[in-house]
Amino acid sequence: MSTAAIVSAPEKPAPAKGIRWLHGEEARGLAMISPTLLYALALLLLPVLLVIAYSFWTQNYLDIDRTFTFENYRLALTEPIYRDLFVRSLWISLLTAAITVGFSYPIAWYISFHGGPHKNLWLFLVTIPCWTSYLLRVMSWKVILGYGGVLNTGLMATGIIEQPITSLLYNANAVVITLVHSWAAFAILPIYVSLQKIDRSLIEAARDLGDGAVRSFLRVTLPLSMPGVISAFLIVMIPTVGDYVTPKLVGGKDGVMIATAIQAQFGKSANWPLGAALSVTTMVLVSLAAAAVVLALRFAVRRIR
Amino acid sequence: MADRPMISIENVSRYYGVYKALDDVSLQIGEGEFFSLLGPSGCGKTTLLRSIAGFDVPTSGEIRIDGVASTLLPANRRPTNMVFQNYAIFPHLDVGENVAYGLKRLRLDATEERRRVSDALDQVRLTGLDRRKADELSGGQRQRVALARALVMRPKVLLLDEPLSALDKKLREQMQVELRSLQQAVGITFILVTHDQYEALALSDRIAVMFGGRIAQVATPKEIYQHPRTRKVADFLGGMNFLRARLLADRKGDVSVDAAQFGTVNLAKPAGFTASDGHVTVGIRPERLRLLWDDERAPHELTGRVENRAYFGEVTHLTIGVDGLEQPLSMIETNDYGADDLPVGAEIRLAYDPDAFVLLADDEMALRA
Ligand SMILES: Nc1ncnc2c1ncn2[C@@H]1O[C@H](COP(=O)(O)OP(=O)(O)OP(=O)(O)O)[C@@H](O)[C@H]1O
Ligand SMILES: [Mg+2]
């Protein structure tokens, strides 16, 4: 380019700093998300802050004593009934998440690798159970698992058992079975997405370098689908810890989870600060458990060589 | 070629539904040979390479690798390794782990494994990059990792599917030189898929040109460039002036034709060639035509006028109209005497060598009949 061309180029005045900020990508992005952001702040962050505040106060019959205290947390962590409920809730949610992911992975894998041209139809079919109400789905498990339920009468008709199995309903197993069924679709989708993103030539490269089908799965497909597995695990585990409906309907006495106790504190017992402390403790525990699970899964996958 | 071919492909066909991606392909590739599969997009090069690698099973036909019937053998049990078109570098592993991937199965001891990995990285000039992640590599480096990962397995055959097509021109030319010297250093069979005729010519011991799932010709680069058997092969490998010529005499090993303004030309006749209707196609490469300057004379001359001119730096491409010829001639001239300054419309004389003409079959059928 000649010098003349540079000299004759029109000079653009530099816009003032504040104005430039307003026109920037960042400002436009913020403007886009601001309604959602405000909504989330108002309906998520504020209530959580309120719950945290309550957990440090004390119930004094009808009014609240606002002096700072750890008493609620002491109760939540030392009272055997709450400790058992925490352990059971975490255990049920971990078990549910593990079983759900274990069942969902082969389905997601099958759709992704062998779904042919009808992958979307398969995914659509997977979501069909979610079309009926959650309550209805839980209730139908009562019909299946009950003393005179579908499973027992079926097994008796075929002669496999002579007496109805009583351990099917109203215990932790029933809660796990029901929760696995309710959450399967939510686990299949993230796993499917992460499997879809795997470049198929990577699997061919593994085969080419000497791996059989199983080894190439363990060394390439599984590690690369780990983000999907982890999100599926968390999507199932986090909400099930605090599930209220399922334990209430199919859990019986042995299937009671922490949400029932929390509900009792906010309801019948009218001890909001204790309920708040139980809630906050649940949140902290579930976060810790989730972090531990993520780390453990990551570590396990790095060990596969 | 050695007594026993390394790869032997016998009457291989591959159908996708009714579409024939490979149509009765037969081919023998020798040990230590640098062999190229050349052809336009969609002609079946990848399909053929993938059936050699074991990723695709032919509908019919046999594939033998080093004497072993391999048609149905899975990829992990073949002594072949592949460099994928997109390189297929494992994103969750670093460079060293990528290269060591296939070695894990051999259960070498740690020092031996490390030695082989670093040897392989040295070989492709990536020394010391083992700890880099796949996404921290340039295109050229990724290509080298893919090469090292395959070579470290010491395969009998290395398969390369357009390994250079994703690189820019400069890097591609540099990698071509490296690929050739790498092949000579390791001494194993390389099978390269490419649609770049210059790459095939520059690198290969032999080339197979493919069209529509069929092999049109297999020959050395020089043979295939100078003596293409069909019009399509000639056209795919560089420019060619085609001429419809009247057959004067059809003898056992050669023919005489009346090549319009070029006069009577004698041509060698390829095996199996038959002329259908008393006319044949002959061709002459643009660089075999030469401009005559001032009062220079040549035994065979033609006069014409410049119809078009394109400047390419070291050479100029000219289009010359000649009275009595249906098509203008294209020619390539060095710029030593000022071909780049010839005005369009200038009257010129050009020299040609009648021996530079080749007889071309119009299609495969003319050769098979
Ligand atoms: N899975 C498939 N299903 C149907 N047709 C296919 C399939 N794979 C390849 N083909 C067809 O077979 C033909 C040969 O394909 P191939 O990939 O071997 O071509 P190619 O010579 O490697 O082309 P390119 O240079 O574009 O890579 C193409 O016409 C392609 O459309
Ligand atoms: Mg291809």
Image (tube, grey):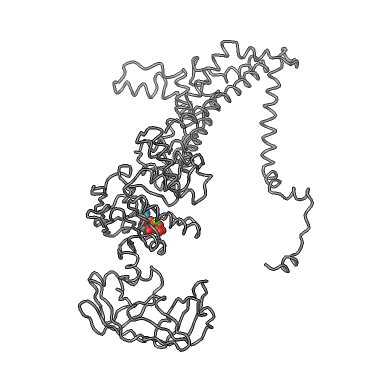
In the image shown, does B323 or A259 lie closer to the viewer?
Answer: B323
Where in the figure is residue A214, as x and y percent of width and height? 36, 36
Ligand 2 picture quarter? bottom left
Q: Nearer the viewer, residue B98 or A259?
A: B98
Location of the C terminus of chain A by quadrant is: top left
Residue B109 visible, this orientation: yes
Q: Position of residue B18 (x, y in %)?
A: 31, 58
Which residue is painted at 24% across and 69% down in the image? Answer: B368
- Single out the residue that lies furthest toward the left: B252
Q: Nearer the viewer, residue A167 or B12?
A: B12
Q: Is residue B56 above or below residue B245?
A: above
Q: Residue at (44%, 77%) from the top-left corner? A: B331
Q: Position of residue B126 (x, y in %)?
A: 48, 46
Please give the name of the residue rendered at 38% of the width and 32% of the height, measured from the top-left corner: B109
Q: Is residue B21 left or right of residue B134?
A: left
Task: Relative to B129, say whether A71 is above or below.
Answer: above
Query: Visible in this render: residue A120?
Result: no
Q: Quadrant of residue A46?
A: top right
Judge from the rendering whether residue B236 lies leftward or rightward of residue A63; answer left or right.
left
Say if B246 sits above or below B156 in the image. Answer: below
**Which residue appears at 67% of the width and 45% of the height?**
A29
Residue A1 found in image quarter: bottom right
**Number of numbered discs present?**
0
Left of A50 or right of it: where is A223?
A: left
Front-lying residue, A126 or A152: A126
Query: Where residue B300 sits: x, y (%)?
Result: 37, 86
